């Protein structure tokens, strides 16, 4: 396994293989297998500004991927090279993602809202060789960003652009996709580059726990396992049509079951470029979508849109909600409107997942986040002293299993904190296990804000705010929000005689080039901050304070 990553201990790896969780199959093999079984079935539907509307069969998809893989070798990419993908939901994402898989290079899953602060750091930390971007998306110029990232990360030699404009020094993806492969068809060469399934397939980024983002190395074996079981839990088959409306780079849309799980079973993936209800619901109708997923904010928007207009959603069999708790009221409303229950999912980039089963009792589906994905998963609910609490009591969830990675990339010190004895990952989520074995997510121990599924590390934003000359100290906490569930609020104490306006703070942070969703959405200037008995800032008190303030306005 790549240096800097933690493999599963031998006895666990042997067990996961013997019990069939791991199949010794790579993500590239998975595509080849479906192309072999279902060459004429539709695999991918999507649009991009350059390619227009795309409709690929499995045979088409495989051919484009293999051709691109061959060209990637020609332009100098090699096995285990890291390549940052920062792409919207366009077909080029799928082509380059699988082409990288075919040559054993490692895609690093950045998201479109990331800016220099995030991408620059990730490029340095992963020593990325390549960076794939649109030229422009949602009025943001990624070409400019790429120049800044290159200035920070000397390893980053190859910028590939999915856009109408690919300036000199960059590679136009569309041109590579078009360029014929001279000589012999490269399949044999690609076969010789097939990575070991125990090797890293993808670098996923952590949702934000402490400080900077952590890099999560997923192997082929664990990612294939995750997508296979997630797809099984939603009864995927070659007749399934998955609509990806959240970023396809995120675990939920990539592998739970997402793009991977749909390919595993030979179904069709439909990419929505924008998550607005009009785009999404029209695609559901036109493509006869059977499975879709989203964070609660998105599901609420879809339900609201259905109040005012008619869309034929009769093909839909499962809507999966996750990333944030789907509360009972939303579940009931969805059932009333759609005639079926929202499947609950709880999971994280590090790979531990739970979900409700389609045939669970209604109360289980409405009130819990279900059970672990595979029978090979193990979990404990722990108190602050590292002692397991009884069923029915709240504690921190610790998990391990065939889909849960054993350590972050190049983060030895952090790994010692993030993992308990015997390789259990400490999720930082507070849960209760009910007497049927279902988990209910009650809150969080980790210092993170969950803004409608987008995760914000409080510590990261606090350290930036501390750079403002007027600020003496700060604490960033979650405040309740009816649409996003949570937004972030910054409490600050100023240096004597200084002032700070909210707009000024936002501008200061924007100049640090951070993703916009990380900006605080309220500023509270105070004279003192409440402390815990051990003298730390009490975020519990601050969350209570801001919730009360919002309640009373
Ligand atoms: P990410 O790694 O971005 O997927 O974020 C993972 C985190 O999102 C988890 O550790 C939880 O804190 C939160 N999360 C995910 N799903 C749920 C859910 N269904 N209910 C509550 N929190 C969730």
Image (cartoon, rainbow, N blue to C red):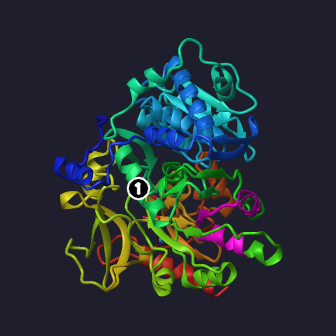
Q: Residue at x 59, y 69 (%)?
A: 319
- Find out if the beta carbon at label 1 lies less than 8 Å from the nearest ligand 1 atom: no
**Residue located farthest toward the right when viewing the structure as drawn:** 309
**Residue located farthest toward the left when viewing the structure as drawn:** 11
User: Where does residue 163 sit, x and y in percent of width and height?
Assistant: 72, 33
- What kind of element bears circle 1? helix
Is 399 left or right of 194, judged from the image as shown? left
Residue 535 sits in quarter: bottom left
Q: Residue at x 81, y 72 (%)?
A: 310
Q: In front: 63, or 419? A: 63
Quadrant showing the N terminus: top left
User: In the picture shown, does residue 478 fall above or below 109?
Assistant: below
User: Where does residue 462 sit, x and y in percent of width and height?
Assistant: 49, 58
Q: Is residue 282 magenta?
A: yes
Magenta part of the chain: 281-303
Q: Residue at x 50, y 49 (%)?
A: 260
User: Where does residue 255 sit, x and y in percent of width and height?
Assistant: 48, 53
Residue beneath disc 1: 226
Q: Main secondary structure of the magenta part?
A: helix
Q: Is residue 551 magenta?
A: no
Mark 1 is surrounded, within 10 Å at the Cα level, by few (under 14), some (14 to 19) or many (20 or more) other residues, namely: many
User: In the picture shown, does residue 374 fall above or below 177?
Assistant: below
């Amino acid at each position: 396994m790549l240096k800097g990553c933690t493999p599963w201990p031998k006895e666990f790896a042997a067990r996961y293989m013997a019990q069939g969780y791991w199949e010794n199959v790579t993500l590239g093999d998975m595509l080849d297998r479906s192309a072999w079984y279902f060459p004429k079935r539709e695999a991918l539907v999507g649009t991009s500004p350059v390619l227009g509307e795309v409709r690929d069969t499995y045979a088409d998809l495989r051919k484009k991927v293999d051709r691109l893989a061959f060209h990637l070798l020609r332009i100098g990419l090699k096995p285990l090279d890291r390549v940052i993908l920062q792409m919207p939901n366009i077909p080029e994402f799928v082509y380059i993602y699988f082409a990288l898989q075919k040559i054993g290079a490692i895609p690093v899953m950045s998201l479109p809202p990331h800016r220099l602060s995030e991408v620059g750091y990730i490029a340095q930390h992963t020593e990325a060789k390549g960076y794939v971007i649109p030229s422009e998306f949602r009025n943001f110029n990624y070409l400019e960003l790429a120049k800044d990232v290159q200035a920070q990360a000397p390893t980053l030699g190859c910028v590939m652009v999915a856009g109408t404009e690919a300036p000199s020094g960059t590679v136009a993806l569309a041109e590579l996709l078009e360029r014929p492969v001279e000589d012999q068809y490269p399949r044999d060469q690609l076969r010789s580059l097939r990575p070991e399934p125990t090797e890293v397939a993808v670098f996923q980024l952590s949702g934000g726990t402490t400080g900077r983002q952590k890099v999560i190395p997923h192997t082929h074996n664990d990612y294939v396992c995750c997508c296979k079981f997630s797809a099984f839990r939603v009864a995927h088959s070659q007749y399934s049509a998955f609509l990806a409306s959240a970023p396809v780079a995120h675990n939920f849309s990539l592998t739970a079951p997402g793009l991977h799980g749909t390919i595993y079973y030979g179904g069709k993936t439909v990419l929505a470029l924008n998550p607005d209800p009009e785009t999404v619901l029209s695609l559901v109708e036109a493509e006869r979508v059977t499975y879709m997923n989203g964070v609660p904010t998105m599901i609420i928007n879809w339900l609201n849109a259905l109040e005012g207009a008619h869309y034929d959603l009769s093909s839909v069999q499962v809507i999966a909600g996750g990333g944030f708790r789907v509360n009972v009221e939303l579940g009931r409303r969805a059932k009333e409107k759609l005639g079926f229950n929202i499947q609950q999912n709880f999971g994280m980039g590090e790979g531990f997942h739970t979900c409700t089963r389609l045939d669970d009792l209604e109360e289980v589906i409405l009130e819990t986040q279900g059970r672990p994905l595979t029978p090979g998963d193990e979990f404990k609910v722990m108190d602050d002293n590292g002692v397991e609490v009884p069923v029915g009591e709240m504690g921190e969830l610790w998990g391990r299993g065939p889909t849960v990675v054993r350590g972050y990339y190049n983060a030895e010190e952090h790994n010692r904190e993030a993992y308990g004895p015997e390789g259990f990952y400490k999720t930082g989520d507070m849960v209760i296990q009910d007497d049927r074995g279902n988990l209910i997510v009650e809150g969080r121990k980790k210092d993170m804000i969950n803004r409608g599924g987008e995760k914000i590390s409080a510590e990261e934003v606090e350290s930036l705010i501390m750079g403002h000359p007027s600020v003496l100290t700060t604490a960033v906490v979650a405040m309740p929000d009816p649409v996003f569930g949570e937004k972030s609020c910054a409490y600050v104490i100023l240096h004597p005689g200084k002032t700070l306006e909210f707009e000024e703070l936002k501008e200061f942070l924007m100049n640090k080039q951070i993703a916009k969703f990380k900006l605080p959405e309220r500023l509270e200037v105070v004279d003192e901050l409440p402390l815990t008995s051990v003298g730390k800032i009490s975020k519990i008190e601050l969350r209570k304070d801001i919730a009360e303030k919002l309640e009373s306005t």
